[in-house]
Amino acid sequence: MAEMIEMKERTKRETVQMKEQPPSERIHNFKEVPLGYTKEEAIYEAQRCLQCKNPTCMRGCPAEINIPAFIRYIVEEDFAKAYLTILETDALPAVTGRVCPQEEQCQKECVLNKRGKPIAIGRLERFVADWARENGIHGIKDKRSRKTMKVAIVGSGPAGLTCAADLAKTGYQVTLFEALHKPGGVLVYGIPEFRLPKSIVEYEVDEIEQLGVKLICNQVIGATKSIEDLKDEFDAIFLSNGAGAPRFMDIPGENMNDVYSANEFLTRSNLMKAYLFPEHDTPIKIRQRAATIGAGNVAMDSARTALRLGAEKSYIIYRRSRAEVPARAEEVHHAEEEGIIFHFLTLPVRILGDKEGRVTGMECIKMELGEPDQSGRRSPIPIENSNFVLEVDMVIDAIGTMANPIVARSAEGVEVNQWGYFKIDQRTKMTTCEGIFAGGDIVRGSATVISAVGDGKIAARSIDDYLSSGKSLKKLII
Amino acid sequence: MWIEAPEIAKTVQPGQFIILMTKEKGERIPLTVADYDRKEGLVHIVFQVVGKTTDELSCFQEGDCLYSFTGPLGRKSEIDFYGTVVVVGGGTGIACIHPIARSLKEAGNKVIAIIGARSKELIIMEKELKVVSDELIITTDDGSYGRKGFVTHALKEKLDQDPSIKKIWTIGPPIMMKVTTELTKLYPVDTIVSLNTIMVDGTGMCGSCRVSIGEETKFVCTDGPEFDGQLVNWDEFMHRIYRYREEEKESWQDFKNKNECRCKEN
Ligand SMILES: Cc1cc2nc3c(=O)[nH]c(=O)nc-3n(C[C@H](O)[C@H](O)[C@H](O)COP(=O)(O)OP(=O)(O)OC[C@H]3O[C@@H](n4cnc5c(N)ncnc54)[C@H](O)[C@@H]3O)c2cc1C
Ligand SMILES: Cc1cc2nc3c(=O)[nH]c(=O)nc-3n(C[C@H](O)[C@H](O)[C@H](O)COP(=O)(O)OP(=O)(O)OC[C@H]3O[C@@H](n4cnc5c(N)ncnc54)[C@H](O)[C@@H]3O)c2cc1C
Ligand code: SF4
Ligand code: SF4
Ligand code: FES
């Protein structure tokens, strides 16, 4: 068993960096980029934790993980207990440990952040989850008697999965409906294999099913069944169908053959495994020069995927400057290392093509930053007569997504705002229809995995309160 | 091919489609619901073997399970009382117009059905269509059955004869739909087409199925699949449906080489 070390020593130590696949190698494969901590590295990092009496780090974790406790177990080399501690509140630890923007969450609140050396909480979480998976450690199956009340959850992204796990642990009968043939939402169709291996998502979803959650794929709520149908069958409903509709720029040439939405490009590659074509049947086109428009996480993922699929040049086109890039710093850093070429202060105005509908170039205009707008960011203004043509032969639109109206259309009495997102009571996550709750991207717009997890947890608690007080959707109908 | 899918059979409407996968590594392909039996919980699909997935599907036998079967997707046909209507079907499109013709008939319309194919063996559902139409015209390209020629020839004659025709549904190969809309542009009729773009999810998530309808971009899976044929940008549509032609060829060839098909094993 490793030792707790002296306080002075703890603050002196540097953060343990995580090893990564070298850029020159990884651009030719879809394997994970960061390789994870070894046991020794994890312990060495865990020893730095001050075990604060008032652990501020926990304030930054919507998954409500008992951070000092699990870190302490790592130091004690009781990785199984560390895992169970995390699992008590977070059903997706290998996922959150990888894709949570920790620097904005728990690590931002860690006291050691003052010295610029916050504990690498996400990496430790990832280590514990991976260790447990590899060593066959499972969560405790609930032995308590099942309640008779039934809850329907629409959409199996992180919000839905979390809500399902928490409700199942409380004893409810949970049915999780998913439109696609595989569960996981953005975790399986959006985030690439090299950042989040799909086998890991599959494993954690399996564990959630083991809690007694009934998962039904290939069911589009609003098409196969309506919300009204669910009301007849279930006592409460949680809507977590994400904000999955792609947005386009509305510029000429956008419907040409080699223009993709990031959703289509990533879905083909991740969910349908087009990178393994023809072993997997779904094709994807790759041209020599790919331009991805936008600079969020989704854009980084698209540009890096294009590179791995064989594009010789992969560009990021962004209308603001480097300072405004919304993607996580780590992702931008990875993209740069891999040779992604950034064009800042550049706005596409037209996609050019040939008679066969193939892209031959993209006309762009240069931008400059003007006065700060309402969001506080300086707004980009086109510079007159600065148009130029970028030679590209494929374009990926990664400028954001919006609400898909299929679910809302079939849900009477559930109000949406002007953008089609469900209106909710912030405290309980209840929509304008009693007994129906909502959370994740379909409430927030494109947000993060961890905020979806947080919403799922709060909703599960509210649903428990609602049902425990003797209410039910079924009673509303009668 | 009849598929057991009680939940879909319960709610599906004419004009809608499903998406299926034959296996986990398969592609998601859309097929129109050609008929349904709500009581028995069955959905009917009719397809033409044009590539790997449809080839594989044709080997499925009674009792086999598809990996995934999702629907009903898309909007239903706008069935109403219009007076006299014509439904035009080509190839597997013949199957797709059958439930539409039936509903139009039930809504009190006079239904003229025109169906066509390359040759006699490809003419399907003749009996079924006879029952739900007031007049059935059959054409074959080679003259081996019915009239020799294209469906558009028969349609032109009808339009010239009968000015009471208000609305036309035309479903079949893209080129047939395009030519039909070019013809009907000259008449005071609405022409509805059903677009078979390349899809992935079929729920409005990816935009693979997008087409230009007039000035707007629409998603075939959620805004369609039926549109006003006069507004469709046919050139763009035809380019987009052939965008994976090389890969499709490779995939089918690979499939044939490996001889993966189960019916060839027996
Ligand atoms: C490429 C990409 C990279 C990202 N990277 C990060 C990152 O690094 N870190 C981070 O924190 N966040 C990241 N995000 C954002 C994050 O993934 C989302 O905020 C999060 O997944 C939202 O979770 P959710 O549960 O609300 O919805 P989703 O994950 O979108 O899941 C919704 C699910 O509902 C299903 N569904 C939709 N409609 C229906 C229906 N009618 N019936 C049944 N099911 C339906 C969908 O198929 C889907 O499975 C990324 C997003 C993308 C697209
Ligand atoms: C709404 C809709 C309804 C349809 N209904 C029918 C029907 O009732 N009967 C029928 O025979 N066909 C129908 N199709 C076309 C059918 O989906 C394609 O024939 C099928 O996908 C071919 O797959 P494949 O692997 O056998 O051939 P592939 O080799 O993959 O492709 C052959 C051709 O099929 C088209 N195609 C390929 N992949 C897709 C895809 N994922 N989605 C759509 N089209 C694709 C392309 O135009 C391609 O040139 C419909 C298409 C749509 C969009
Ligand atoms: S889930 Fe995210 S916020 Fe919570 S401890 Fe893990 S990395 Fe930090
Ligand atoms: S705030 Fe930082 S040092 Fe303190 S308990 Fe949390 S992780 Fe450890
Ligand atoms: S098929 Fe994906 S949006 Fe229509």
Image (spheres, coloured by chain):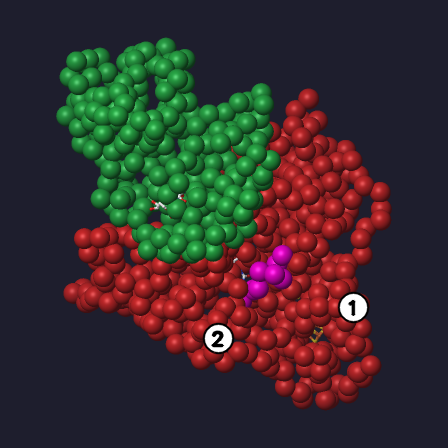
Q: Quadrant of the C terminus of chain B?
A: top right
Spot occupied by residue A252 in the image (x, y as percentages of width and height): 24, 52
Question: Crowdedness of circle 2 by 10 Å Cα count: few (<14), some, many (20+)?
Answer: some
Spot occupied by residue B225 in the image (x, y as percentages of width and height): 37, 35
Q: Secondary structure at mark 2?
A: helix
Question: Looking at the picture, does residue B116 appear above or below residue B200?
Answer: above
Q: Tell me which numbered mark, 2 or 1, is placed earlier along the sequence.
A: 2
Amino acid on which the number 2 mark rests in the picture: Arg
Question: The numbered mark 2 sits on a residue in which chain?
Answer: A
Q: Give the colour in which the image draws chain B.
A: green
Question: Looking at the picture, does residue A334 appear above or below residue A253?
Answer: below
Return the residue at label 2.
A26
Numbered circle sitting on residue A80:
1
Prevalent SS, magenta region: helix
Q: Give the colour in which the image draws chain A.
A: red
Spot occupied by residue A89 in the image (x, y as percentages of width and height): 72, 58
Task: Specify the farthest residue to the front.
Answer: B266
Give yes or no for residue A199 being in the magenta stretch.
yes
Question: Looking at the picture, does residue A123 appear above or below residue B115?
Answer: below
Tell me which segment is drawn in magenta.
Answer: A195-202
